[in-house]
């Protein structure tokens, strides 16, 4: 809990915020010794009491105050305990990476022995473990660790504050840094940079001072690029590109992806940016596993006798693509008698009703026509699980190439039409569907199926049934009850916006509820006003706000667990609020 640090924006574990010291620091940021004071190691004093007194003497300063700390080896607990420093000013605390002790309250936590976290496994375990042990609205500082090459990864791990110590030290040691790695300056025939420091070194010779200044400038430039990536909600794509600089960084990202709970609890339900699946690590992204999990646990397919398997398209949503328009023309009026399922990488399965949900409507992949073994295995696992949950009497697979081969190898009993969009291929598709749809049950209006599917996808199984209970009227992208009162609208990014009437229908399910105290909020709901919040809530989720005096709807700005544990920050952007 803190009154000196506030998170303003999130993109997974990466955050942008503000730290209020003598100057306001916008994080992620580089700090220097001008921003903090420290009593140093207890072993530099003649007694423990003297060390504690040195910390007490620093109180009252507007800088970040670090009391005396006890040094310890990377995997050792401190040999001594120091009494907590009680101060009203901004407080820092050095914590050991693998300590099992829950640290005392502070505004900023400094990661002890950060420079020794050379092993990717240690780095990920230390940062993720510490972030889970400290309050979400506190800042994490990793001293002497940042380089232009690894800064993006460090911010994505969840580190808010870094410094230029390593850059200065490496300059003195003759090391030359760029975002693409580090070299011995003496080995470079030409300096691959045109900053003023490099221009001076090209003409006047390499010096430790100029080298350190160049290194620090490259670090500052990289920080600006990383901040832009967080701001545009594309930090993951940036990190996937940047970790290719070194094998240990790629290993760290892969290890981080195995910390699924840590990432999922912080990942937004949707992003404004396009989802680029450019490498093998993209298969392990939270967005991929979350989408698949919701398809297999929350979504229930319409009761159809016939399943039509189709390939994806480059254009999203698929229905707007030329290929899917041709598929629709070939199937004709029989679309009301079958259910369509699109097979794709990396999402595996996208029901037609959910093609506008994130990330199905906004992803892109390198198209080669080839499926690697990981993609094929992921698709096969998801398809098998889906068909156990959703039964069909007949299946038509309009697939070709390795995609068809993958489905055939899964053992699925289907009519395979060979795929394609040529006239002969489309004719085969039309004939196969006509035969499969004989005596098939007609499905409800596709628009109602889409609303039902989206409600279940965003609010859990049964939400669609509760929201669409009774007579429902569809008007454009809005649904209304029989009295023509709006229940929900379908936004252009595929999410749902509830009306007050729709929220009342879903309230009884007890999900995505934010409970507040005895007051009527205005504008935005701040975290201190939250009494309890559903653990399932993620940034960007539509939520229902319930209090003794208030009832409303809005968009979550932070996860439910974070709302309950934070003392600062906007929890929910309210759209409608009324007094009860």
Image: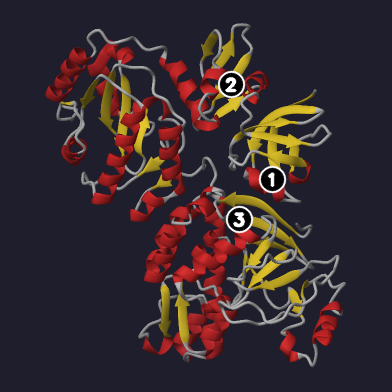
Which residue corresponds to the image point at 34% horizontal and 32% vertical from the top-left?
Answer: 386
**Distance (Cα) linking label 3 and label 2:** 31 Å
The residue pinned by badge 3 equals: 15
Image location (x, y in percent) of residue 127: 56, 65
Residue 436, image x, y percentages: 21, 15
Q: Quadrant of the C terminus?
A: top right
Q: Are marks 3 and 2 in contact (CB under 8 Å)?
A: no
- Choose the circle earlier in sequence order: 3 or 2: 3
Considering the numbered disc 1 on the image, is that residue within a helix, a strand or a loop?
helix
* Horizontal arrangement in the rendering, residue 575 relative to residue 407 (left or right): right
Quarter of the rendering occupied by the N terminus: bottom right
Q: CA distance from mark 1 to mark 3?
A: 15 Å
User: Quarter of the image holding residue 119?
Assistant: bottom left
Q: Nearer the viewer, mark 1 or mark 3?
A: 1
Q: Earlier in the sequence, mark 1 or mark 2?
A: 2
Q: Which residue is mark 2?
A: 488
Task: State how far apart marks 1 and 2 are (Cα).
Answer: 25 Å
Please report whichever mark, 1 or 3, sits nearer to the chain's N-terminal start.
3
Determine the secondary structure under disc 3: strand
**Residue that appears at 68% across and 21% down:** 500
The residue carrying pointer 3 sits among few (fewer than 14), some (14 to 19) or many (20 or more) residues within 10 Å by Cα, namely many
In the displayed structure image, the side of residue 90 where residue 492 appears, left or right: left
Q: Residue at x 56, y 49 (%)?
A: 266
Find numbered disc 2 in the image and state the secondary structure of the residue it sits on: strand
Give above or below for 438 relative to 401: above
Could you tell me which residue is drawn at 69 percent across and 57 percent down? 135
Residue 313 seen by the camera: no
Which residue is identified by label 1? Answer: 563
Between 485 and 234, the residue placed more toward the observer is 485
């Amino acid at each position: 809990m803190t009154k000196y640090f506030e998170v303003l924006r999130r993109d997974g574990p990466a955050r942008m915020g503000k730290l209020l010291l003598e100057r306001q620091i916008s994080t992620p940021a580089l700090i220097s010794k001008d921003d903090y004071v420290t009593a140093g190691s207890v072993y530099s004093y003649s007694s423990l009491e003297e060390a504690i007194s040195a910390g007490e003497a620093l109180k009252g300063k507007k800088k970040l105050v670090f009391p005396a700390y006890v040094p310890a080896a990377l995997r050792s607990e401190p040999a001594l305990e120091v009494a907590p420093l009680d101060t009203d000013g901004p407080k820092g605390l050095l914590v050991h990476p693998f300590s099992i002790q829950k640290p005392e309250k502070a505004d900023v936590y400094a990661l002890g022995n950060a420079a020794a976290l050379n092993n990717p496994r240690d780095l990920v375990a230390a940062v993720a473990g510490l972030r889970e042990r400290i309050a979400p609205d506190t800042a994490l500082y990793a001293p002497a660790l940042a380089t232009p090459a690894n800064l993006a990864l460090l911010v994505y791990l969840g580190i808010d504050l870094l410094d230029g110590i390593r850059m200065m030290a490496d300059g003195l040691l003759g090391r030359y840094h760029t975002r693409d790695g580090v070299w011995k300056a003496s080995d470079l025939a030409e300096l691959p940079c045109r900053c003023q420091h490099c221009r001076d070194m090209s003409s006047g010779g390499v010096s430790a001072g100029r080298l350190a200044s160049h290194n620090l400038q490259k670090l500052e430039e990289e920080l600006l690029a990383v901040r832009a990536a967080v701001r545009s909600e594309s930090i993951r794509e940036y990190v996937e590109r940047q970790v290719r600089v070194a094998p240990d960084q790629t290993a760290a990202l892969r290890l981080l992806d195995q910390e699924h709970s840590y990432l999922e609890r912080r990942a937004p339900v949707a992003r404004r940016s396009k989802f680029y699946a450019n490498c093998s690590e993209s298969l392990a992204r939270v967005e991929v596993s979350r989408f698949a999990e919701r398809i297999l646990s929350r979504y229930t397919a319409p009761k159809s006798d016939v399943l039509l398997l189709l390939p994806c398209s480059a254009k999203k949503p698929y229905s707007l693509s030329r290929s899917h328009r041709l598929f629709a023309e070939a199937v004709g009026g029989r679309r009301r008698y079958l259910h369509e399922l699109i097979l794709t990488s990396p999402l595996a399965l996208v029901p037609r009703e959910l093609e506008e949900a994130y990330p199905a409507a906004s992803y892109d992949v390198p198209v080669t026509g080839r499926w690697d073994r990981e993609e094929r295995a992921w698709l096969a696992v998801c398809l098998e699980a889906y068909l156990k949950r959703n039964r069909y009497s007949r299946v038509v697979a309009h697939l070709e190439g390795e995609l068809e081969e993958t489905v055939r190898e899964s053992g699925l009993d289907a009519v395979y039409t060979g795929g394609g969009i040529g006239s002969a291929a489309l004719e085969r598709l039309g004939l196969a569907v006509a035969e499969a749809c004989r005596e098939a049950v007609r499905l409800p209006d596709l628009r109602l199926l889409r609303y039902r599917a989206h409600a279940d996808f965003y609010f859990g199984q049964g939400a669609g049934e509760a929201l669409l209970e009774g007579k429902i009227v569809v008007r454009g992208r809005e649904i209304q009850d029989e009295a023509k009162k709006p229940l929900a609208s379908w936004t252009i990014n595929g999410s749902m916006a509830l009306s007050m009437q729709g929220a009342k229908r879903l309230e009884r399910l007890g999900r995505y509820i934010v409970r507040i105290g005895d007051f009527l909020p205005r504008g935005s709901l701040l975290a201190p006003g939250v009494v309890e919040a559903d653990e399932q809530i993620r940034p960007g989720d539509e939520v229902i706000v319930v209090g003794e005096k208030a009832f409303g709807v809005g968009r979550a700005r932070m996860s439910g667990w974070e709302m309950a544990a934070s003392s600062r920050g906007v929890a929910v952007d309210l759209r409608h609020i009324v007094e009860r």
